Amino acid sequence: MPDLVSVKGDALPILPLRNTVLFPQQIIPIYIGRDQSLKLIEDLPENGDKKIIVVAQRDGSIENPTSDDLFEWGTLATVMRVFNMPDKQKSAIVQGIARIKIVKITQSTPFFIGNGIRFDDPEDQSVELEAMMSNLHGIYQKLVDVAPYLSNEQYKQVTSITHPGKYADRAVSVMNISTEEKQKILESINIHDRLERATVVINRELQRIELSEKIQSDVQDEISKSQREYYLREQMKAIRKELGEDEPAVELVEMEKKITDAKMPKEVEKVAKKELERLKRIPSQSPEYTVARTYVEWLVDLPWSNTTSDNEDIEQAREILDADHYGLQKIKERVLEHLAVRKLKRARSKKGERLKSPILCFGGPPGTGKTSLGKSIARSMDRKFVRISLGGVRDEAEIRGHRRTYIGALPGRIIANLKKCGTNNPIFMLDEIDKLGMDFRGDPSSALLEVLDPEQNFAFNDHYLEVDFDLSNVIFITTANRIDQIPGPLRDRMEVLEFNGYILDEKLNIAKDHLLDKQIKEHGLKEKKEIEFTDEGIIKIIDSYTREAGVRNLERQIANICRKAAMEFATGKVKKIIIDPEKVEAYLGAQKFYPEVAERCEKPGVVVGLAWTAFGGDILFVEASKMPGKGELKLTGQLGDVMKESVQAAFSYVRANAESIGIDPDFYLKYDIHVHVPAGAIPKDGPSAGITMLTAISSLLLDIPVKERVGMTGEISLRGNVLPIGGLKEKATAAHRAGLKHIIVPRLNKKDLDDIPAKVKKDLKITFVSDVMEVLKFALGLEPVSVNGK
């Protein structure tokens, strides 16, 4: 007998079930519609212990049972989760814990409450119990083979259990038998008796199903429709053979030749030939014939041995990369390094040794040349280029394919694109990998873990093919706008190369070297003979009509100008057009962006902050205003919680150190402070605007405007320390783009100075600070005020 464990005398709610028996360790959903049961669920605590007693009714047809209508034995259970249903009812997920015998019901309304004794199964097992369990396992396996309502998944769940008592419980719980039979098993606290009763129940169910099938087989004495069709097709096949019209045979001979010519790996060739032999035995009119033939055709058409030769001339590859893209030196160097390593390994490696390819991830704002650089890499290596967009992909089958059991099944996009390009070593670009989705059809990012792992992808197994394909020769390049949105395990498999926003000089060179030629040709114009862009005109487009990290909008505006110029040529109005700043404004209209930094910062309380975004850096204005009041701090501009806390910290520091800053210590008794960050439709968050907020409040209260063209970024502490921030490179580039001349940043970010472009460092004065008093000194020209002689 198992040990008896009392429920500490505490009364528990009792939930009656109709036509259902809950076993220990079993998890089931329960639909709750009766008022009594709804009140019980609603009375459970939101947090903490949600234990109840679940007991079956003797008669499931009784709507409002009394205590006499319930079995004495039930299950101690915990309510895992409760859901609200559309019809104002509820549904609950309940897990059984242990058997329990109801000793006394202490309350009947609004729901049953009672005491019980808990029975736990002992962990020790005898040889006899193990033998009985083995016998039960054999009978249950036979039942699963014949019972249509039992799946292999259920069988695996049951057979994974090693405890005899729990095995009997789980086996009986999934069977379609009466409530009374299940209740008898539940009431069997002796494991020996429980195994005996479970064996009898399973044997009876097995005999019932086998007898039912025998009766059905005896009754059906006519030939089925499918058998009749098969007989007729075999006759047609024989007639065609006599007439010399055996077309499928010719097709199969050609297929056999293609299998030989494909030079597949031995294992794959074995599978293909086996499928071909099966194809010969299937009637050509059968739907199964088409499925099998399509599968063999996929195996034949894949580039198992088709490999393009790499260009190993590193200098030529460098020239191609430089011709196609301006700048991006670190990324180009990484590609050339790979070519050099591959050249050496190919020359020095042993025959049959596998050469691993790198998995690169290009991360950066839109329009910075990530996708186009992939094409240039393919051109520099003399490889084919394949690109698939992963934006919005939610189905794992898009990567791994569908299993052939499904109608219309096909391989995933990896295999499909390799077949399309015809080689097994292309440059394969997976665009927008940070925008992968996930739903009930699976997680595509998890499926990519194998694809993007050089230690595993030499044996990539597509669900449709069910044979291994070697992806180790493929160079995978992924692109993303936000690296932080790529799942960690996937990001860990890739080497991230960052693309930064372009500065003015870089955009000017990109426009002159690439964009102008392309757009002039696309619009049917002749460069220099009919249209010529001046440097001043291009700078006017960049400064006044675009504000971006990349060059896509710049290209659109150039295309806009070319269209208008083509219109004038087509109407015979001009012979040559010079695109200078005046012409740009005439074609594009009033300028969209103004250098507003100087104008907006003339008044006290306005400061320029530096922000990081997914599309590069940007500047933001912080404005502070005061009005008569009693020290209330009001925040607007759709600020996040972290940014609000930064303002609170800045305000607290100003109040605590008002005298040393030179501010009236009682200012908060006279004024309310309102801090606003414009562009209120855009959410803003992060701690890096701390010193900006503090400077804005100090500037307002001191009535001193911030120095001209000064920007800043840095987190603050309540003690006045300036703490490091992230994204300094992007923020400095944005400051340069916006026309700032001086930026104030935390001293602990000095290590990031090497990442900032040389042109930006040359044009910008960068001041490193560690204390907020230094910030006020450089931004407002303020010297600390001596307080009490200190």
Image (cartoon, rainbow, N blue to C red):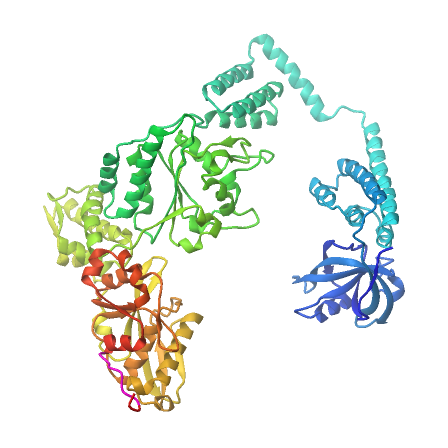
Res 372 visible: yes
> Which image quarter: residue 244?
top right
Looking at the image, is 679 positioned above or below residue 152?
A: below
Residue 364: x percent and y percent?
A: 34, 52
Image quarter (top left, top right, bottom left or bottom right) of the N terminus: bottom right
Q: Is residue 312 above or below residue 705?
A: above
At 57% from the left edge and 36% from the top edge, which residue is drawn?
403
Relative side of 305 to 779, left or right? right
* Front residue of 427 and 195: 195
Query: In the image, 734: left or right of 208?
Result: left
For residue 693, side relative to residue 565 (left or right): right
For the residue pair 614 and 591, the one nearer the viewer reads as: 614
Q: Is residue 640 visible?
A: no
Query: Can residue 784 be found in the magenta stretch?
Result: yes
Picture quadrant of residue 35: bottom right
In the rendered structure, the answer to whether residue 215 lies left or right of residue 686 reads right
Magenta range is 781-787
* Residue 420 locus on image (x, y percent): 41, 31
Main SS category, magenta section: loop
Q: Quadrant of the C terminus?
A: bottom left
Q: Residue furthest right?
A: 68
Residue 501 placed where, x, y %?
A: 29, 55
Asked if the stretch drawn in magenta spans residue 129, the answer is no
How many callouts does the rendering have?
A: 0
Nearer to the camera, 565 or 646: 646
Residue 539 locus on image (x, y percent): 18, 56
